[in-house]
Image (spheres, rainbow, N blue to C red):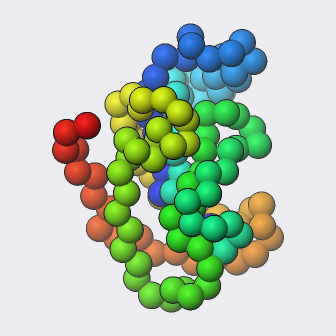
């Protein structure tokens, strides 16, 4: 699927022991701090819009389907989201500061092919 990732800061000490150990291993591998949480906005035909999909690897990565189905393939799509509301929906908590935004297109888990183009990504830092 196509993905726009938003990485958030947070207090790792509040997580369960197993999750803190994962963070420690990831930090050792990356040789730097890793984000507390990642919210991935995905374009997919696998689940309905609005579905939150937890990562199979960590509780701190959640995917949120913002488009679904083949109807708009090959055409530019415009999506507006409220990061705070989406974070609350995915994590049931208040978000920390945004650390980074990234984009990716991958099919390693689906075994299919995909091409994605991204443009005009904007984050409006209005009041919470």
> In the drawing, does residue 13 fall left or right of residue 46?
left
Q: Is residue 18 visible?
A: yes
Q: Which picture quadrant has residue 47?
A: bottom right
- Number of marks drawn: 0
Q: Is residue 20 shown left or right of residue 2? A: right
The image shows residue 40, relative to residue 95, as above or below, that is below
**Where is residue 63 drawn, in percent x and y?**
60, 51
Image-based side of 98 in relation to 1, left or right: left
Decide if residue 99 is on the left or right side of residue 103: left
- Is residue 6 visible in the rendered structure shown here? no
Q: Tell me the quadrant of the picture where the N terminus can be found.
A: bottom right
Q: Looking at the picture, does residue 25 appear above or below residue 66?
A: above
Residue 26 placed where, x, y %? 65, 27
Q: Residue at x 59, y 73 (%)?
A: 68
Q: Position of residue 50 (x, y in %)?
A: 55, 60
Give the vertical position of 10 relative to 58 (above or below).
above
Quarter of the C terminus within the rendering = top left
Say which quarter of the image contains residue 46: bottom right
Viewer-proximal residue among 50 and 1: 50
Residue 42 pos. (x, y %): 56, 62
Rendered residue at 40%/45% (across/down): 85
Query: Is 128 rendered above or below residue 52?
Result: above
Res. 105 image quadrant: bottom right
Q: Residue at x 42, y 29 (%)?
A: 94
Identify which residue is drawn at 80% across, 70% down. 111
């Amino acid at each position: 699927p196509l993905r726009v990732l938003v990485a958030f800061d947070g207090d790792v000490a509040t997580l369960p022991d197993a999750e803190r150990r994962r963070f420690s291993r990831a930090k050792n591998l990356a040789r730097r701090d890793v984000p507390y949480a990642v919210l991935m906005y995905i374009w997919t035909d696998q689940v309905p819009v609005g579905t939150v999909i937890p990562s199979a690897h960590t509780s701190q990565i959640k995917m949120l389907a913002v488009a679904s189905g083949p109807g708009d393939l090959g055409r530019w799509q415009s999506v507006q989201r409220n990061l705070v509301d989406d974070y609350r929906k995915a994590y049931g908590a208040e978000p920390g500061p945004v650390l980074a935004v990234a984009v990716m297109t991958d099919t390693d888990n689906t075994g299919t092919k995909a091409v994605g183009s991204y443009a005009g990504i904007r984050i409006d830092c209005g009041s919470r």
